[in-house]
Image (cartoon, rainbow, N blue to C red):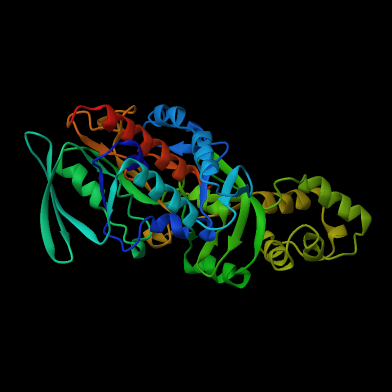
Amino acid sequence: MMCAAHAGPGVLVIDHAKAPGEKIRISGGGRCNFTNMYAAPENFLSQNPHFCKSALSRYTQWDFIDLVAQHGIAYHEKTLGQLFCDSSAKDIIALLLAEMEKVGAELRLRTSVLSVAKTESGFSVEIEQDGTRETLNCANVVIATGGKSIPKMGATGFGYQIARQFGLPLIETRPALVPLTFGEDIMADLKPLAGLSAPARVSCNGTSFEEGLLMTHRGLSGPSILQISSYWREGDAVTVNLAPEMDVKTTLKAKRQENGRRQVSTVLGDLLPARLAQHLAGISGLSGNIADLADTALDHLAATITGWSLKPNGSEGYRTAEVTLGGVNTDALSSKTMQAKDIPGLYFIGEVVDVTGWLGGYNFQWAWSSGWAAGQAIQQRPA
């Protein structure tokens, strides 16, 4: 829809869904985290971290924020630069539909694409709507089908299929921004903690995120876990610091000095939720009065709180993943136009491309920026 709004007249958007922008509608708890004030190339993962720079610098978060303001949509910052609609995510869908209508772009829902073929003058696209097949001839084809995430919303690997058909290489895809799961040995200890949340700094493979962490019946979730899931790989451990803003060693030694008769788990309960405090006291192997613990024991306890290491056995997969990591290899695309280098008129934008943002509005900004870039290029390209 963003691309169509900028590509000029004569654009047809084909969507197999019953309603437009369904992923927008469900995002952000129904209020759509439509961009992030701090969006920058370093907030995106790709085999080529430089690819996203062109589109993001030419159509920025401030450009989209201006568009939101022009449409009279009230919004607020929730945290860390994340901007949400005050009312409803449907406001963003209405904005995009209005922008499309302004340029005369058409939208067809409940329509399937059966095939895309190259012709001498452009492309031939066979579609089906309500059992009726039709062949369309066009100068340009834009693949904006997203990844495999949330299949119940209609997500498929269609975009990757088209890329393979035209010989474009793919970067292996995997679920991202997704809760992590654990084996029965770890879950036996974690399940009693289900429902607990706490601020945490979660680290893996040299990257850390400091946000909320949530214990679930299947493993770990919350913003910090969703963020680190994009960097986690099978076999890796994640390290959880449950007191990222505290000098835990100094605090524990002060607690020992203040009232040494208190139990270790009780003292930890001053710093953490009670059930979590008891669990960490248990896995540290320390008990009794805190006065009975030597400095080395307190150091070990502090290390347990700030360096709790857990090895996931997997993730919840595409079923709950917010985005798909990997996709169409950016080496095959122009970073300025999003056009396939060897196939004039064929464009790939958004999540289907190997550009994946952090949690917090970054993936929407990539949709707006890459859609704008392709739309501008199509508008300027000879028909």
Depth order, front residue of 235/76: 76
Up-down: is 247 above or below 188? Answer: above
Up-down: is 62 above or below 212? Answer: above
In the image, taking residue 250 as reference, residue 302 lies left or right, namely left
- In the rendered image, which quarter contains the C terminus? top left
Residue 338, given in percent of the width and then of the height, sits at 30, 33
Q: For the image shown, how many numbered marks are present on the structure?
A: 0
Q: Residue at x 32, y 35 (%)?
A: 375
Q: Residue at x 62, y 43 (%)?
A: 80
In the image, taking residue 147 as reference, residue 166 lies left or right, namely left
Quadrant in the rendering for residue 281: bottom right
Q: Residue at x 16, y 36 (%)?
A: 139
Quadrant in the rendering for residue 289: bottom right
Residue 11, given in percent of the width and then of the height, sits at 25, 43
Depth order, front residue of 267/13: 13
Residue 56 appears anywhere in the view: yes
The furthest residue to the left: 120
Residue 353 appears anywhere in the view: no
Residue 222, given in percent of the width and then of the height, sits at 57, 57
Q: Residue at x 52, y 41 (%)?
A: 70
Up-down: is 217 above or below 241? Answer: below
Residue 112, given in percent of the width and then of the height, sits at 20, 58
Up-down: is 117 above or below 255? Answer: above
In the image, taking residue 193 as reference, residue 299 lies left or right, namely right
